[in-house]
Amino acid sequence: MRFLVQEKGRAIALRKKGYSYRDILREVHVSKSSISLWLQDLPLTKDEKTYLKSRRDSNISRGRMRAAASLHELRLSRDNVLLQEARKEFVLYREVSLFTTGIALYWAEGSKRTSVFSFANSDSEMINLMLSWIERFFGVGRKAIKVRLYIHKPYAHENCESWWSREISVPLSNFQKTIYKPTGLLVKKRPDYKGCLRIELGTTYRLRKMQFWQQMLIEHYRN
């Protein structure tokens, strides 16, 4: 009994210093229910409440920092595995012209501001080449690839999605909602223009692998 009285006194003293329940449980060796019962009617001063909140916020910040560090380590580990895989594949394919051409093409025309593999162009032959590259080196068939057309409003009535579908052999069902770009023109300036088509592969690891291959291509020709 005397032990519990002493522990209760310690718990109350720690609470007044701004300790959280979790902090108190580390110091006072009783059950959480006992701590809750002892402290439920304990009034805190304004300064004590402020201090308690600052400790709680500090604990949250430390928790977030630990979580961020853990996530960073996980990303580094995944990147290292992907790098080793990319290096083996680069050695295997570096003499294949389509392989190096596709890497250089993405380096020049691929998106640099997204977290996924994204390539856009208005030249259907260039789009076809990139699709062939994706099929061979990423193993993703055309019927599984999502595309999106970007075009100006004056061309909307021409059903350019169907034209692109025929040209690149990607089913219309794989076309995402067309984006109509703003323009002050009411008539077509380029009669043969069919818009700009974007290919997007919705996974980060393919973009990272392409980035590794680009660096390896630079080093290959630099040496």
Image (tube, rainbow, N blue to C red):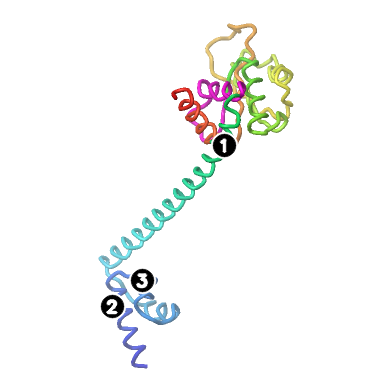
Is 113 magenta? The answer is: yes
184 lies left or right of 194? left
Report, in whole angstroms, how far the alpha carbon at label 2 lies from the one at label 1. Answer: 63 Å
Q: Residue at x 36, y 79 (%)?
A: 28
> Between tags 2 and 1, which lies in front?
1
Query: Mark 1 sits on what residue?
Result: 88
57 lies left or right of 93? left
Q: Amino acid at mark 1?
A: Lys
Q: Residue at x 49, y 48 (%)?
A: 77
Element on which disc 2 rests = helix
Q: Amino acid at mark 2?
A: Ala
Magenta part of the chain: 96-119
175 lies left or right of 59? right
**Dot 3 crowding, Cα within 10 Å, few <14, some 14–19, many 20+:** few
Q: Position of residue 145 (x, y in %)?
A: 67, 31
Q: Upstream in the sequence, badge 3 or badge 2?
A: 2
- Quarter of the picture holding the C terminus: top left
Tell me the tag on residue 13.
2
Q: Residue at x 27, y 71 (%)?
A: 17
Q: Upstream in the sequence, badge 3 or badge 1?
A: 3
**Dot 1 crowding, Cα within 10 Å, few <14, some 14–19, many 20+:** few
Q: How many marks?
A: 3
Query: Mark 3 sits on what residue?
Result: 23
Element on which disc 3 rests = helix
> Between tags 3 and 2, which lies in front?
3
Front position in the image: 203 or 16: 203
Whether 145 is drawn above or below 68: the answer is above
